[in-house]
Amino acid sequence: MKAEIIAVVTEELNKLGIEVVRKTIVGDNRDLLAEAFRDALDRVALIVASGGLGPTEDDLTRETVAELLGRKLQRNDAILRYIEGRFRQLGREMPAVNVRQAMVPEGAEVLENPRGSAPGLWLEDSGRCVALLPGPPRELKPMYYEQVLPRLERRRSGIRMFHRELRVAGMGESRVEQRIRPIYTRYGDVNTTILAAPGEIQIHLRMWTDDAAQAQKTLDEIAQGFEIALTDRIFSQDGSSMEEVVARLLTMNKATISAAESCTGGLLAQRLTSIGGSSSYFLGGVVCYSNELKTVWADVPPELIQAKGAVSGEVAIALAEGIRRHVGSTLGVGITGIAGPSGGSDEKPVGTVHIALSHAGGVKERGVRFPGDREAIRWHASQLALDMVRIHFLYNGGEPPARGAKRS
């Protein structure tokens, strides 16, 4: 079974053994939308589309699909009453234009949407299936899992996709490729994709088979080979983000952390606290842009800033040690740098960042120059700071290093 998705994620269908062969994004243009659906109907047995089910004139999905399948649109009074009820709950009168959302192609199954006003639609025609889902993710995802997924599972074959996602920090895409290519090219039945993402490289392994045990064995072999080739640069083998990995390490080691940030403007703290339960390990932090507040909030000596400059390894160390003392955390992180676009010099160009990690046994500092714009530099800095925390636990009595990793 093959499928096309129009403006919706693909991974969930691949897990069912439904190969997604194309993704299409179409604007609010009736002719282009009709062309996209017409071509997909000619190629595959399943189409999943999101968006274009709203009440306005530019919401064209239901009308376009109905016309292509030769189905008349009929008003569904149950849907209309539901939409009217939603407006009453809000203390508002339903605009007449919302009646369009109650128009359903002949023979279509209505997919209820308790989270919004636009119902989804499921249509079957000459062996082909079309799922029309609302665009907002908070409506789309539950509708897919609750109503579309069970329909697809009844149609699935024994073959499905097995997937492994490894994430790598501190290495570029070409270097990763150079190291792992001799490994993954030995497995002709596994598709390997290397993707560059902000602050990391993602390696996706995909294998289509009906033999789950063999798939897991093969993917394990490849991952073990990657561990030897990339050593401690692999920070995740299950697709977890860097902050999720660090959160687990802090929790597992019963450690706490604090941060004194300048150029990242609180981004490190935001990432650390984006995980549920972060209050157990993140005690607090400060954003100290001015030199005066570096002194007030993190005890950085004014004479040190004057002698070395606010963007320096010495100040990063003082920030890390100062915030750790102030807060009483196991670890303290200090970040200072020049995120741009202005503020750089020949000696310290834009992208210059210093990051320090303080703990009871000492302090480690990294000075780097990141490429990119302001947003990219800030993200790279937060990523490196988190990776320094990960490496601290890797080599200081925390979680053991990955198999094949060499200690430095």
Image (spheres, helix red, strand yellow):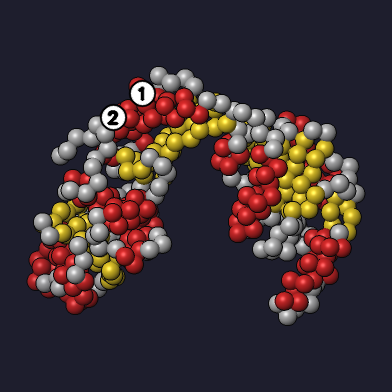
Callout 1: few (<14), some (14-19), or many (20+) C-alpha neighbours within 10 Å? some
Q: Secondary structure at mark 1?
A: helix
**Residue closest to the eye, 156 or 49:** 156
Report which residue position mark 2 lands on: 229
In the picture as drawn, the residue positioned furthest to the bottom comes out as 91
The amino acid marked with disc number 1 is: Ile
- Left or right: residue 349 compared with residue 95: left
Is 205 or 213 nearer to us in this picture?
A: 213
Placement of 171 over or under 82, stated as above or below? above
| Above or below, comparing residue 211 to residue 75 in the picture | above
* Residue 50 visible within the image: no
Residue labelled with disc 1:
183
Q: Left or right? Give the position of 307 relative to 375.
A: left
Please identify the quadrant where the N terminus is shown.
top right
Residue 334 drawn at (x, y percent):
22, 62
- Which residue corresponds to the image point at 34% horizontal and 67% vertical from the top-left? 279
* 222 relative to 110, above or below: above
Residue 332 coordinates in the image, percent (x, y): 21, 63
335 relative position to 379: left or right: left
In percent of width and height, residue 149 lies at: 65, 45
Of the image marks 2 and 1, the number of the one nearer the N terminus:
1
When asked about the image quadrant of residue 123, the answer is: top right
- In the depicted structure, whether residue 39 falls above or below residue 263: above
Residue 309: quarter of image: bottom left
Mark 2 to mark 1: distance in Å? 9 Å
- Locate residue 10 relative to residue 276 in the image: left or right: right
- Local secondary structure at mark 2: helix
Looking at the rendered structure, the kind of residue marked 2 is Ala
Quadrant where the C terminus sits is top left
User: Are the two marked residues, 2 and 1, in contact with CB atoms closer than 8 angstroms?
Assistant: yes
Percent coordinates x, y for residue 105 in the rendering: 85, 50
Q: Residues within 10 Å of mark 2 (few under 14, many from 20)?
A: many
